[in-house]
Amino acid sequence: MKALMTEVHGRTFGIWTLLTCTLCYICAFNLENEALYLVTFLSFVYAFGHFLIEYLVYGTMTIKNLSAVSFFAGTSIIWMLLQWNSHQL
């Protein structure tokens, strides 16, 4: 059985995307801020974890959608880990 996304879930996802983009934008101009860098990093970890659970446990995502999310979140997680201390003053 496949669950459909309701309008409220679509709007919630839209707001979450806007919040994430805002966080990434602010972090990009404040890379020396360790707390902000950590929060931005964790936002990708939480997003990846959330979508993975939606796929594995609840079955509300397709592998195609999970692959797209995994590409962006996974790339961001790896990149941020590799750059973890390179922006400190």
Image: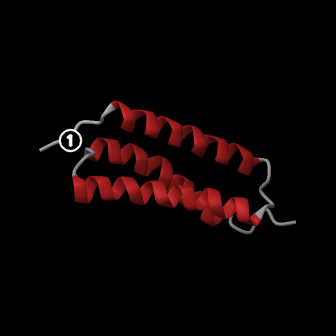
The image quadrant that residue 1 belongs to is top left
Q: Which percent across, then down, holds residue 52? A: 34, 57
Q: Which percent across, then down, holds residue 43? A: 55, 56
The image quadrant that residue 7 belongs to is top left
Quadrant holding the C terminus:
bottom right
Furthest residue toward bottom: 85
- Residue 27 in view in this figure: yes
Question: Of 15 and 70, which appears nearest the observer?
Answer: 15
Q: Which percent across, then down, holds residue 31? A: 77, 56
| Residue that carries the numbered disc 1 in the rendered image | 3
The image quadrant that residue 39 belongs to is bottom right
26 relative to 88 in the view: left or right = left
39 lies above or below 85: above
Q: Amino acid at mark 1?
A: Ala
49 relative to 1 in the view: left or right = right
Residue ID at (69%, 60%): 37
Dot 1: element: loop
- Residue 86 in view in this figure: no
14 lies above or below 89: above
32 relative to 41 in the view: left or right = right
Q: Which percent across, then down, holds residue 71? A: 44, 48
Q: Residues within 10 Å of mark 1 (few under 14, many from 20)?
A: few
